[in-house]
Amino acid sequence: MPNNSLRPIRERKGMTVAQLAGKTSISIRTLQAYEAGERGIAPDDLRKLSRVLYVSTADLLQPSEGQSPSPPPPPSPRPIAPAVELTPQPTPPPRPPIAPSPEPVRRTQVDGNRTPRPTPTAPRPAREPRAPKPPGPATAGQIEQIRHLARRMGIDEPSLVERFGAPLESLDHTAARAAITSLRTEMEESGTWQPRVAEGPDQEGEYLRKLREHGIPIEILLINGERFAGRISDFTPYVIQIRDRTNGEEVTVRKLAIAYYHTLEPVNDAE
Amino acid sequence: MTLSDLLPYLRARKGGVFYSEVSEGTGIPPLRLVRAERTFTVPNLTAEELDRLAAYFDVPVDQLRQAATESRSILTTYLATREKDGRPAHLNLVGGVHVSGMVAWRDRHAVGLRQPDDTCLVVYRSNVEGWQRVEGEAAAGDQQQE
């Protein structure tokens, strides 16, 4: 009889020995020895087990009752006896031996013992095509896009409803997509459509870096009419810091407040 | 001017208020304000939110509504065409200032205009109120705003 309750506690937690070994870094063999009572649980292992199993060390060291305390599995429900006596089923005839495949099966020697399974050559029966799903309602993005295109074309909401025969919210996904396509086509044909032009990566940062490296002074005009002039000492995506050339003070200006700025010396693009 | 350009300008005019302050003043979540400024597609601010912003910034609501319908691509296309054709761009800034120059570089927020004396003038898009072409120039793809 084991002198500990490791096994019943483990089973109560629904863990296998391997899982417990994985969580505690104790080998399976050692755990099995502990559970069988062949060895006493080492103090280090005891701490690990109590931590993983959420029980006290005293609980673990409590002698087992001699058998697993886990409740026996519930009895499987017995089949209800039929009201009428069933006629015995005839035993099926023995299966004929499997005929050898007409095509030679390629066997590749992988590791000397294992051979891959031959792939079945018989084609699968064709499935019946599924019935197409009905389209879902138009998304909020589609409706917004239709409204945006309509605004650009000067079409108001009642005209849109009249055009599509229903309020935009009641359009389904397919109808909304068709509506967007038709509006775009119309815009292209009318010349209202402006193709999207790439705006490119951050060019201003590169430009400011160049000005700072070459010490080119700039003059900044704020939207309130104030002006500052000096060399750039630092900048971020949101601010430009310059050393004022009149008093040498550092001035930090938020780009938000800048109407424009210009260099006070020529800038060579080749540099 | 598009809404993504107008909102930073209005924030600057109101003393450089931050999104959080606008949010407190209007009850519009800051994330929606950030999106409206930085998302360069269709802003999804509601009409009611535009009303609140107009009241907060003390501007006519029509100005915001108009800006919400305008597309960034119009100014971008104008600048791209000028850059490609090697012709000067003429920009009207807020406050009645007019600037011009050859497009040296451009990005999402600013455009660098080379001046005849080889200095460079940098304009933020949020300050561009309109643009024009000079009389007598052929104009393919240009847009006249206003």
Image (spheres, helix red, strand yellow):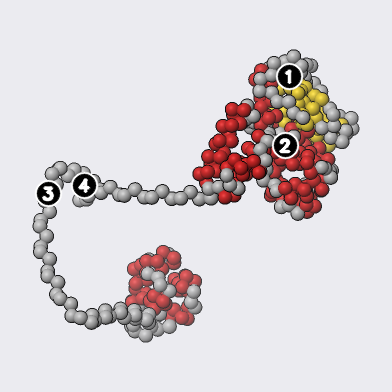
- Does A113 appear above or below A13? above
In terms of secondary structure, where does tag 4 sit? loop
Q: Which mark is residue A100?
A: 3
Q: Is residue A29 left or right of residue A133?
A: left
Q: Are marks 4 and 1 in contact (CB under 8 Å)?
A: no
Q: Residue at x 43, y 83 (%)?
A: A62
Q: Mark 3, chain letter?
A: A
In terms of secondary structure, where does tag 2 sit? loop
- Does A137 appear above or below A227? below
Mark 2 and mark 4: span between their CA atoms?
Answer: 64 Å
Q: Which of the 4 image quarters holds residue B146?
A: top right
Mark 4 and mark 1: span between their CA atoms?
Answer: 72 Å
The nearer-to-camera label among 3 and 1 is 1
Q: Residue at x 70, y 36 (%)?
A: B70
Q: Is residue B92 left or right of residue A13?
A: right
Q: Is disc 1 in the same subunit as disc 2?
A: yes
Q: Is disc 4 in the same subunit as disc 1?
A: no
- Does A198 appear above or below B69? above
- The residue labelled by disc 2 is B2
Q: Are marks 3 and 4 in contact (CB under 8 Å)?
A: no
Q: Which of the 4 image quarters holds residue B105?
A: top right
Residue A243, given in percent of the width and then of the height, sits at: 83, 33
Q: Which mark is residue B88?
A: 1
In terms of secondary structure, where does tag 3 sit? loop
Sequence-wise, the earlier of marks 1 and 2 is 2
- The residue labelled by disc 4 is A122
Q: Is disc 3 in the same subunit as disc 4?
A: yes
Amino acid type shown at disc 4: Ala
Query: Dot 2, how many residues are within 10 Å of its Cα: few (below 14), some (14-19), or many (20+)?
Result: many
Q: Is disc 3 in the same subunit as disc 1?
A: no
